Image (cartoon, rainbow, N blue to C red):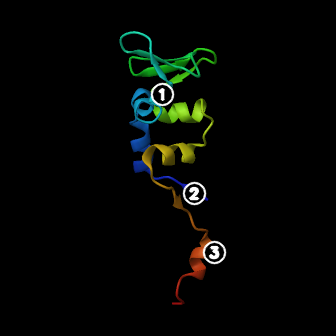
Amino acid sequence: MSGVSKKQVEQAREIDLLSYLQAYESHDLKPQGPGRHILRDHDSLVISNSRWIQNSTGIGGVSALHYLIKVRNMGFVEAVEHLTGERAAEARSYQEAAKNQPPS
């Protein structure tokens, strides 16, 4: 079972969608006036004033994390890993940890 740290989640939440798209998917970003952008592939998604909304579904948010989860259908852990570039720590089961402990 995998999990991400609070630090990783905080880092991922700090990335706004416009900054993410400019860095990784700038080819899909289309200006629509001062401070306003749409996506070429999803023209119902509008980014304005550091917020985004997908008009066709009514889903919106601020961070790239919410976009990856709600629009791109990524799992939470996968989206955090994608944004931070860090793998989630693997949680070990109690039995596995006990096997690796020297006898006392």
Q: Quadrant of the N terminus?
A: bottom right
Residue 84 picture location, percent across and down: 43, 47
- Where disc 1 sits, the SS reads helix
Question: Is 41 above or below relative to 83?
Answer: above
Q: Which residue is mark 1?
A: 27
Question: Is 75 above or below relative to 71?
Answer: below
Question: What amino acid is labelled 1 in the image?
Answer: His
Question: What amino acid is labelled 3 in the image?
Answer: Gln
- Identify which residue is drawn at 53% across, 30% down: 67
Q: Nearer the viewer, mark 2 or mark 3?
A: 2
Question: Is 73 above or below relative to 103?
Answer: above
- The crowding category of the residue bearing disc 3, from other C-alpha atoms within 10 Å (few below 14, some 14 to 19, many at least 20), is few
Q: Which residue is mark 2?
A: 2
Question: What amino acid is labelled 2 in the image?
Answer: Ser
Dot placed on the residue nearer the N-terminal end, 2 or 1: 2
Residue 69 picture location, percent across and down: 58, 35
Give whichever of 86, 5 is nearer the camera: 86
Give whichever of 21, 99 is nearer the camera: 21
| Mark 3–mark 1 distance (CA, rounded to whole Å) | 49 Å
Is 34 on the left or on the right of 26, as rendered? left
